[in-house]
């Protein structure tokens, strides 16, 4: 039989082998499947998880305050705005494209929010909807230029970076900065709203239960269709691990302020995108287009529609991030969305394991990658080190992540040819 170099085909073949092992040997099969995936070069998010442990260990040794409950609460809250933008970057990277303008789009959305809410006395929910509409329109505009004229996404979004930055300055006008009232619900949500301790534990139980039920139903569907599926011990073990792990995290955060509602929103968006990418036809189409565009087109997938959807999602998530950043700061100004916001969003997606070559990655990569970046920022701030060191360390971590991605991709290709 003829083999192929397509990362999508190699990944599908590996997944099928994993499920056969799990169905045959239960927990032993699951462990064997993980080892086989590692040997084939499909490391998933293992490198970023190991890197996070190393970073936390070093920073905790240098400053015992780093892993305190109070600092971790701040870390989770500060990671949300750019983390949401990174979730959109994951979508475009999965189809092998890029968006360099998420920072500018977020800044423009923040400016629209502030002007309508404060300057035009529009209700806050109306101002938020208008800000999100900005993201939708921008993403649609990108997709039309990309699909109709074939202009590379790099060029389109680079032009957008400059153009929407100019629009942001125009919208803010001569004031340059607009403060949001601290007593507004939006600012309260981003700064002071935390989940009651009892409810946070309920969320943990629900999360573990949903993981088990969804896995059980998926396994039953596969068995009904005559396909291999995860065994019951594997499903129970991973749900129990999630229950214990999340329970300990929530307990520790509850030692101070607890879990912020804004972070809950971020996690909810990650879970929604994970479901859409892994359990829907649209998600499978996204991975197929990223793995091999021409093969996806011949398989009957509307490639242009897939591109349109990811561009719109990316810009919309950028707008959401801009709204949350403005709420977190209680202001929108000329520096909103500028600086390292754009680069951190892209870096978080790549560090989280999303391939620059398309076809591989997950929504959880945005969450883990952003925590890595925010951990570096928080730890070096506690050490009173200059921001130049933070940029250098983040750049080194990003380069390492890309090297791991390139090496694992080469290994998967060689494994597929074997």
Image (cartoon, grey):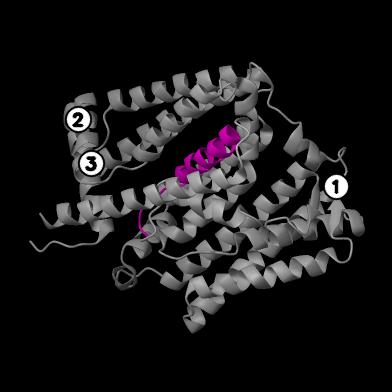
Could you say whether the residue bearing mark 1 is in a helix, strand or loop?
loop
Q: Residue 304 in the image: x percent, y percent?
A: 45, 73
Q: Residues within 10 Å of mark 2 (few under 14, many from 20)?
A: many
Q: Residues within 10 Å of mark 3 (few under 14, many from 20)?
A: some
Q: Which mark is residue 29?
A: 2
Q: Residue 380 in the image: x percent, y percent?
A: 57, 35
Q: Quadrant of residue 74?
A: top right
Figure label count: 3
Q: Is residue 205 visible?
A: no
The stretch in magenta equals: 358-380
Residue matched to label 1? 180
Q: Find out whether residue 67 is within the magenta segment.
A: no
Q: Find out whether residue 373 is within the magenta segment.
A: yes
Could you say whether the residue bearing mark 2 is in a helix, strand or loop?
helix
Compare marks 1 and 3 and give the one earlier in the sequence: 3
Quadrant in which the N terminus appears: bottom left
Residue lying at the far bottom of the rendered structure: 149
Q: Report the Cα–Cα distance between label 1 and label 3.
A: 50 Å
Q: Residue 250 in the image: x percent, y percent?
A: 57, 21
Could you say whether the residue bearing mark 3 is in a helix, strand or loop?
helix
Residue matched to label 3? 37
């Amino acid at each position: 039989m003829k083999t192929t170099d397509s990362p999508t085909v190699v990944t599908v073949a590996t997944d099928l082998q994993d499920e056969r092992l799990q169905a045959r040997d239960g927990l032993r099969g699951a462990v064997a499947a993980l080892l086989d995936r590692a040997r084939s070069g499909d490391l998933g998010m293992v490198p970023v998880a190991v890197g996070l442990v190393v970073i936390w260990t070093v920073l905790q040794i240098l400053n015992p305050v780093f892993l305190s409950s109070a600092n971790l609460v701040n870390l989770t809250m500060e990671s949300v705005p750019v983390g949401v933008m990174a979730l959109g970057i994951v979508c475009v990277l999965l189809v092998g494209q890029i968006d360099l303008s998420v920072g500018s789009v977020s800044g423009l959305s923040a400016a629209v929010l502030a002007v309508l809410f404060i300057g035009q006395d529009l209700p806050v929910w109306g101002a938020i909807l208008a800000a999100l509409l900005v993201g939708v329109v921008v993403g649609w505009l990108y997709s039309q230029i990309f699909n109709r004229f074939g202009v590379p996404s790099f060029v389109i979004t680079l032009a957008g970076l400059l153009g929407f930055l100019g629009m942001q300055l125009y919208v803010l006008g001569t004031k340059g900065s607009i403060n949001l009232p601290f007593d507004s619900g939006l600012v309260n949500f981003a700064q002071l709203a935390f989940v009651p301790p009892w409810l946070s534990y309920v969320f943990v139980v629900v999360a573990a239960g949903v993981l088990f039920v969804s896995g059980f139903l998926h396994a039953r569907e596969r068995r009904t269709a005559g396909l291999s599926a995860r065994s019951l011990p594997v499903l129970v073990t991973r749900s129990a691990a999630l229950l214990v792990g999340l329970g300990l995290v929530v307990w520790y955060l509850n030692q101070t302020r607890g879990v912020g509602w804004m972070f809950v929103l971020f996690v909810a968006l990650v879970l929604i995108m994970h479901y859409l990418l892994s359990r829907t036809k649209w998600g499978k189409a996204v991975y197929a287009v990223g793995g091999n565009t021409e093969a996806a087109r011949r398989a009957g997938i509307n490639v242009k529609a897939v591109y349109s959807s990811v561009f719109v999602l990316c810009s919309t998530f950028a707008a959401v991030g801009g709204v949350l950043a403005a709420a977190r700061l209680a202001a929108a100004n000329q520096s909103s969305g500028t600086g390292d916001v754009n680069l951190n969003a892209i870096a978080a997606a790549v560090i989280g394991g999303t391939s620059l070559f398309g076809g591989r990655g997950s929504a959880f990569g945005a969450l883990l990658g952003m925590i890595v970046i925010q951990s570096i920022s928080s730890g070096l701030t506690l050490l009173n080190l200059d921001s130049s060191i933070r940029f250098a360390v983040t750049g080194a971590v990003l380069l390492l992540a890309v090297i791991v991605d390139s090496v694992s991709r080469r290994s998967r290709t060689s494994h597929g040819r074997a």
